[in-house]
Image (spheres, rainbow, N blue to C red):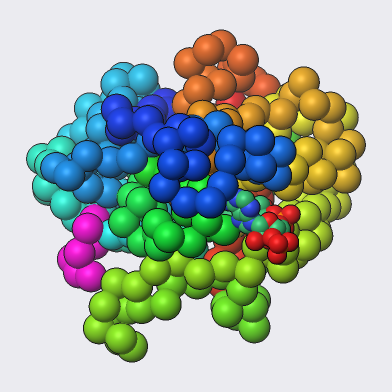
Amino acid sequence: MRSVLRGCGSYLPARILTNAELAAKVDTNDEWIVQRTGIRARHIAADDETTGTLGLKAAKAALADAGIPASEVDLIIVATATPDHTFPATATEIQAALDITQGAAFDLQAVCSGFVFALATADKFLTSGAAKTALVIGAETFSRILDWEDRATCVLFGDGAGAVVLRAEEGEGTLADRGVLTTHIRSDGRYMNKLYVDGGPGSTKTVGFLRMEGREVFKHAVVNLADTVRHTFEETGLTGADIDWFVPHQANRRIIDATAHKLGIDEDRVVVTVDKHGNTSAASIPLALAQAHMDGRIKPGQLVLIEAMGGGFTWGSALIRW
Ligand code: ACO
């Protein structure tokens, strides 16, 4: 069995916050942000929007793109580090809003690697026969856990959501099959204090704010991302030259460029959207996938490589034939 990607969709809140607007609030400037990160703007959720409402809009767009009714979905995984409530899961909110009363819905927490972890998890359910049609959603409202006085972090993140619909279909068991071909996920909790939120229900009883040692994260990101993709290449016998589209986590243009270079993937096969919405954590890969799918860059039958790294540290990659 293969988890075949049948559709994708995304949603960005209407409010756009530019670098110039941020420079009026904290001691920063457009040139510094663009040069160090490639980010020009980010979207900010309105007061009446939540991670759940963002995720729901992306899910509806993905289902419409797939032409699959919500009633056929029997697995929903929402990758998020900014759930609407401590419990229940944002996934169950979205399940109810879609009028789905079958199967299971749960959240998955791997921060910026969340979408890759959720895709890998859904793939195990679908290929084992435990579910038939899955919605995998990455949705975040990072604007609500940012310290807006900390210029080192508040310029980097934004809100948004993306989703894909996966369906279990029979394949031949070769790399020519459509669908998820291989996934690799990793974590190493020794680095948790390099990128974390300084609150939580089990510790401070508060939500907390994002804290990060940017330089340390950068260093580990390039090494870990290249490492996880190397496993994909070793397992499949493929190289960077075989990849039609590289769709990395959209955190920082310099991390994306350095990783693509290390993997031998040409710049014109890299999908970059970080300039438009900053780092949207678990939402960034499905946002970029939806963009490249909608504008016709990714075509059926092509090989798409995704990868991400985030707090924990967590990191991972997946190879998909579109
Ligand atoms: N505007 C202007 N100056 C700033 C800003 C800002 N927004 N933020 C920091 N600075 C200053 C610092 O105070 C420092 O000043 P100093 O030299 O007087 O002390 C100077 O800029 C350099 O700071 P560094 O942190 O060393 O800058 P660096 O070149 O490492 O860039 C950055 C910082 C962009 C955060 C980089 O380290 C990075 O991209 N790290 C990866 C972080 C990331 O992407 N995290 C997302 C989650 S993990 C992931 O998704 C991969």
**Residue 163 part of the magenta segment:** no
11 above or below 128?
A: above
Image position, residue 100 (x, y; %): 15, 43
Residue range of the region highlighted in magenta in the rendering: 84-90
Of the 4 image quadrants, the one containing the C terminus is top right
User: Could you say which quadrant of the image residue 85 lies in?
Assistant: bottom left
Can residue 128 be seen?
no
Q: Nearer the viewer, residue 214 or 249?
A: 214
Q: Quadrant of ligand 1?
A: bottom right
Residue at horizontal 51%, vertical 36%? 19
Residue 82 at what x, y percent from top left?
A: 33, 59
Residue 29 appears in the rendering? yes
Q: Is residue 215 found left or right of 321 in the rendered image?
A: right
Horizontal arrangement in the rendering, residue 52 relative to residue 266 (left or right): left
Q: Nearer the viewer, residue 15 or 132?
A: 15
**Residue at image point 77% right, 55% down:** 222
For residue 184, side relative to residue 229 (left or right): left
Relative to 219, does residue 271 appear above or below in the rendering?
above
Marker count (numbered): 0
> Is 146 on the left-hand or right-hand side of 219?
left
Q: Residue at x 75, y 24 (%)?
A: 269
Residue at the extreme top of the image, as rendered: 296
Residue 313 placement (x, y as % from top left): 61, 70
**Residue farthest to the bottom?**
203
Which of 96/12 is in front?
12
| Residue 35, image x, y percentages | 71, 38
Question: What's the residue at 49%, 33% (across, down)?
Answer: 20
Secondary structure, magenta segment, majority class: loop
